[in-house]
Image: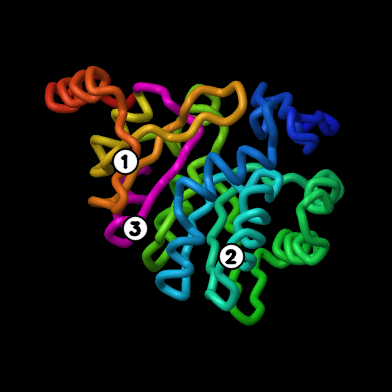
């Protein structure tokens, strides 16, 4: 059960999930995190401009913040581009709990759209197709079709929700990416980075948001410009562990 809203550093609110024991967003700023931890490093507006379309896999619908801001930013910066987002959520909150977070998005129409998505699990309008799948991500991924340009990897932490961080799941996600597709996550845990490497991703340093440490970005093949590199010493250490098979996923 999620507790009432908690104000974050950018003036937007998040929730604390009592059973999980974690907040849905960084306390530095829920909206700040959506834009600068996920949307920007995944280069979704650049892709939409270049291709005229973009497909996003949103792992952890949560309060709808990442999804809502992605739609807003892409439509503002790449008008006319077709957007498709498939969102996975293990523990969907009820509409009354979600209502204030939908209303806090930058456009009122986004709130209406996300309410419809939660009710119907699908929202389709010209140039925009949204799908919400509810259940364990490890099972849902087998039902997801097509190739994606970007992944927002934003479930609860590996300690609290280990499934979406394991190499077998991340390999399934990797297999659904276009060449050069980008994943971004808030986690900088060594185990997560090892799982990404073992499942075929190339990894780099994600952006820091507020007081939080840098996360991790990953690509399905080479990208231009290249991902921000990890510290050279850390890269060598991770490579040795991957090659030796140390710290295999449990």
Instruction: Tell me: 100 left or right of 60.
Output: right
Instruction: Tell me: 212 left or right of 16.
Output: left
The residue lying at 70 percent from left, 63 percent from top is: 117
Mark 2 and mark 1: Cα distance apart in space: 35 Å
Q: Give the labeled residue for mark 1.
A: 168
Instruction: Tell me: 164 left or right of 99.
Output: left
96 relative to 118, above or below: above
**Quadrant occupied by the N terminus:** top right
Magenta-drawn stretch contains 184:
yes
Cβ atoms at labels 3 and 2 below 8 Å apart? no
The image shows residue 134 at horizontal and vertical percentages of 60, 52
The residue lying at 47 percent from left, 64 percent from top is: 55
The residue tagged with tag 2: helix, strand or loop? Answer: helix
Q: Which of 211 and 19 is in front in this view?
A: 211
Q: In which quarter of the image is residue 50?
A: bottom left
**Quadrant occupied by the C terminus:** top left
The residue lying at 30 percent from left, 37 percent from top is: 203
Q: Give the labeled residue for mark 3.
A: 177
The image shows residue 80 at horizontal and vertical percentages of 57, 78
Cβ atoms at labels 1 and 3 below 8 Å apart? no
The residue tagged with tag 3: helix, strand or loop? Answer: strand
Total residue callouts: 3
Q: State which mark lies toward you, 3 or 2.
A: 2
Comes first in the chain, label 2 or label 1: 2
Comes first in the chain, label 1 or label 3: 1
Q: Give the range drawn in magenta.
A: 167-190
143 relative to 22, above or below: below
Badge 3: how crowded within 10 Å, few (<14), some, or many (20+)? many
Q: Give the labeled residue for mark 2.
A: 77
8 relative to 227, above or below: above
Badge 2: how crowded within 10 Å, few (<14), some, or many (20+)? few
Magenta-drawn stretch contains 213:
no
């Amino acid at each position: 059960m999620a507790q009432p809203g908690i104000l974050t550093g950018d003036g937007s609110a998040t929730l604390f999930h009592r059973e999980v024991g974690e907040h849905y967003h960084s306390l530095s700023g829920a909206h700040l995190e959506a834009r600068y931890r996920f949307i920007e490093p995944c280069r979704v507006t650049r892709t939409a401009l270049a291709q005229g379309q973009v497909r996003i896999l949103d792992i952890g619908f949560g309060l709808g913040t990442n999804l809502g801001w992605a739609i807003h930013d892409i439509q503002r910066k790449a008008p006319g581009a077709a957007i498709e987002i498939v969102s996975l959520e293990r523990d969907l909150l009820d509409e009354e709990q979600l209502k204030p977070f939908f209303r806090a998005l930058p456009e009122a129409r986004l709130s209406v759209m996300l309410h419809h998505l939660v009710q119907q699990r699908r929202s389709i309008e010209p140039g925009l197709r949204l799908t919400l799948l509810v259940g364990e991500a490890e099972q849902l991924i087998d039902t997801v079709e097509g190739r994606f340009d970007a992944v927002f990897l934003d479930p609860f932490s590996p300690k609290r929700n280990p499934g979406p961080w394991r190499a077998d799941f991340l390999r399934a996600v990797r297999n659904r990416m276009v060449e050069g597709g980008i994943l971004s996550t808030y986690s900088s845990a060594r185990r997560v980075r090892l799982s990404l490497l073992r499942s075929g991703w190339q990894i780099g340093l994600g952006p820091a948001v507020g007081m939080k440490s840098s996360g991790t970005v990953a690509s399905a093949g080479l990208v231009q410009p290249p991902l921000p590199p990890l510290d050279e010493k850390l890269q060598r250490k991770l490579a040795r562990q991957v090659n030796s098979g140390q710290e295999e996923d449990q």
